Amino acid sequence: MDAPIPSSPGQATAATVRVARPQADLLNSFAGDPNFMLSLARGLSVLEAFSERKRPLTISQVAQRTQLSRASVRRCLYTLEQLGYVSQQGGQFALRPRVLHLGHAYFSSTSLVSLAQPILDALSTRIQQTSALAILDDTDILYLVRSEVQRVLTYSLGMGSRLPAYCTSIGRMLLAHLAEPALEDFFDHVDLRPRTLQTKISRAELEASFAHARELDYVLIDEELEPGLRAIAVPVRGISGSVMAGISVSVRAAQVSEAEMISRLLPPMREAAVAIGKLIAA
């Protein structure tokens, strides 16, 4: 699902790109913990290696993405194949539909999904633009609800889809409201890479944008995720006032100006956010 990374990202240098902590190092940090199932963690890491790739992967490619040994990856893939989660053909592995059961339990048990859908549908109908509801999950945003009026991304997003938090409007909004320890942990683990020539990838730039988001109570992203794409996001607050999720609206930059997004799209988005916030107990 990644947008193409520019070959000449301008200000993106070795000094500004933050590389994520290798998955193998993360798993090894639990060494000595008698309650931690390392084999299960490795299997989940192998499954997640497929999350951003539509084409099948070889053992070597999975090993490279997870930073696990080829032997560990081979055993994990063999087990997952026997359980029906992956299939193999000619030494290449792909996910099977059974993997959807892992996420279905979460979405089917979350009433917010079914309750928020009609609110987003009404918003999208009113403004004639695609809207979405997402939460922060590790260093990504996780889409819970989406109402698509027209395709604005070059790839399709649906329930359970993920995108990097640092270069998405909802992600920026949610990161802006993290407590300092959680934000520090985010920067320790995130892989900051330029998605376009406009992508902010330095910590200083991102923290400045977080402060701006808290001041304005909205975030506007201009061609940082994908060329020609603009998005605006507002926070969804629970009864306690804590930011629990975010609503975004995505548009084609050539069709909708920043000024129009703020004047025409922002007010109904805030109304939808209040309506959804009343559904959240926290």
Image (cartoon, grey):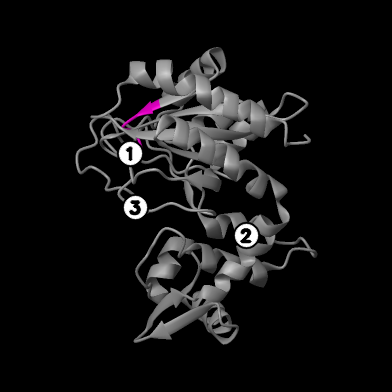
CB within 8 Å, label 2 to label 3: no
Q: Name the foreground residue: 193 vs 17.
A: 193
Q: Residues within 10 Å of mark 3 (few under 14, many from 20)?
A: few
Q: Secondary structure at mark 1?
A: loop
Residue 227 rendering spot, x and y as whole percentages: 26, 37
Q: Quadrant of residue 236?
A: top right
> On residue 28, which mark appears?
2
Give whichever of discs 2 and 3 has the lower sequence position.
Answer: 2
In this rendering, is residue 100 above or below 189? below
Q: Which residue is mark 3?
A: 155
* View extreme (left): residue: 8
> On residue 236, which mark appears?
none
The amino acid marked with disc number 2 is Asn
Q: Residues within 10 Å of mark 1 (few under 14, many from 20)?
A: many
Closer to us: mark 2 or mark 1?
Answer: 1
- On screen, residue 126 versus residue 236, left or right, reads left
Q: Residue at x 49, y 71 (%)?
A: 69
In this rendering, is residue 110 above or below 40? above
Q: Which residue is mark 1?
A: 194
Q: Main secondary structure of the magenta part?
A: loop
Q: Secondary structure at mark 2?
A: helix
CB within 8 Å, label 2 to label 1: no
